[in-house]
Image (spheres, grey):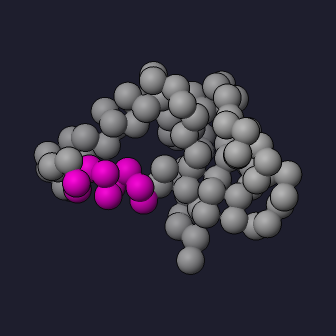
Amino acid sequence: MLERKPTADKNNIIKEIRRNNTRKKEVIQALKKENGSIWEEDRVVYIEGKVYVPNNKKIREEILKENHDLVDVGHPEQQRMWELLKRNY
């Protein structure tokens, strides 16, 4: 089942991803195949319903900051943090 994607216009990370259009060769090739599990929407790539994060230090740090101290989960340990990030990215 595909996961719900984040609201694009309200998310600063999504805006940064749109500005940074860098993609690995594998992602570009997969987009060309159009198999349904990977697609592009408004300059954001989704793989199995999750946002593809380009190899960009600024974007990755922003994702970590945004998800590190969520009010509803408190301060997560490393494994829990990784699980939270994998839900959307």
Left or right: 22 in relation to 70? right
Q: Is residue 14 left or right of residue 71?
A: right
At 77% from the left and 43% from the top, the residue drawn is: 28
Q: Is residue 42 visible?
A: no
Return the residue nearer the eye: 49 or 8.
49
Q: Toward which corner of the image does residue 19 lie, by quadrant?
A: top right
Question: Residue at image x 43%, y 32%?
Answer: 60
Image quadrant where one finds the N terminus: bottom right
The magenta stretch is 79-87
Q: Quadrant of residue 18?
A: top right
Q: Nearer the viewer, residue 11 or 31?
A: 31
Query: Where is residue 58 drawn, in percent x and y?
Result: 45, 22
Q: Main secondary structure of the magenta part?
A: helix
Q: Position of residue 14 (x, y in %)?
A: 56, 38
Most distant residue in the front direction: 26
Using residue 55 as the reference point, say whether residue 22 is left or right of it: right
Q: Position of residue 8 (x, y in %)?
A: 59, 45
The magenta stretch spans residue 8? no
